[in-house]
Image: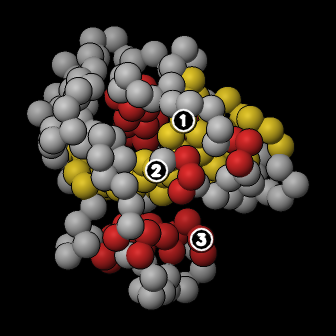
Amino acid sequence: MLSITSSLIRGDLILRPVCKDTDRSIIRELFRHEFYGARAQLYPDEGLWEIYDSMETHEAFGAYLVFYHDRLLFLLEVHPPVQMDLAPDCLSQPGTIGIYCFYASPDDHLNSMALRTVIAALLGYRSIRRIITRINYVTPADPRALLLEKAGFRRLAKTPDKAAIYYCLKRTGGPLAEGQTLAHPDGLGHRSHNMFG
């Protein structure tokens, strides 16, 4: 289970695994916002949990909600590369994992700090050398792309559609803010709901 510590903002940032029993409406709203934008359309409940029921959950893999105090910032999904919607050549390097982020508000100024901290913790795992992600329907000055770039990601290549693929390597990961330290669990059974506990 992913766990992060920071002496700079101890106790303020909270990461917890998604709970099927309590988080259904939160996840549905995050997906609705991601896929339908401002349109008043409901995200269907059918199939909503299929991906989470089959998701890997060892080491850092899993789905997490990231909060600042009680304010939801984003949903983070950490996947083995084969579960990503990407071309095979993007997935072949050893030590590659995939992430998806679904923001409550992409313009929230706290997203940058939280994403940088999460990425640094992921890159703290010995087995993780490369993180890859995809943004659908990327636009010029897209806040989601800017957040990734601030967290140390680079754009991999232009795709024929409006999607963008970004990657981050251990050596290009964005630096932590002054005073931050990482906890990268070595065991599989490590569990922490508070990122800075």
Tell me the residue that label 3 is attached to: 35
Instruction: Say left or right for 187 vs 95.
Output: left
Classify 10 Å Cα crowding around label 1: few (below 14), some (14-19), many (20 and above): many
- The label shown at residue 79 is 2
Residue shown at 26%/16% (left/top)?
A: 181
Distance of label 2 from label 3 (alpha carbons): 20 Å
Determine the image quadrant of residue 117. Answer: top left
Depth order, front residue of 36/189: 189
- The label shown at residue 96 is 1
User: What is the secondary structure assignment of the residue under circle 1?
Assistant: strand
Q: Earlier in the sequence, mark 2 or mark 1?
A: 2
Residue shown at 72%/59% (left/top)?
A: 137
Distance of label 2 from label 1 (alpha carbons): 10 Å
Q: Residue furthest left?
A: 197
User: What is the secondary structure assignment of the residue under circle 2?
Assistant: strand
Determine the image quadrant of residue 197. Answer: top left
**How many numbered marks, from 0 up?**
3
User: What is the secondary structure assignment of the residue under circle 3?
Assistant: helix
Would you say residue 136 is visible in this rendering?
Answer: yes
Classify 10 Å Cα crowding around label 3: few (below 14), some (14-19), many (20 and above): some
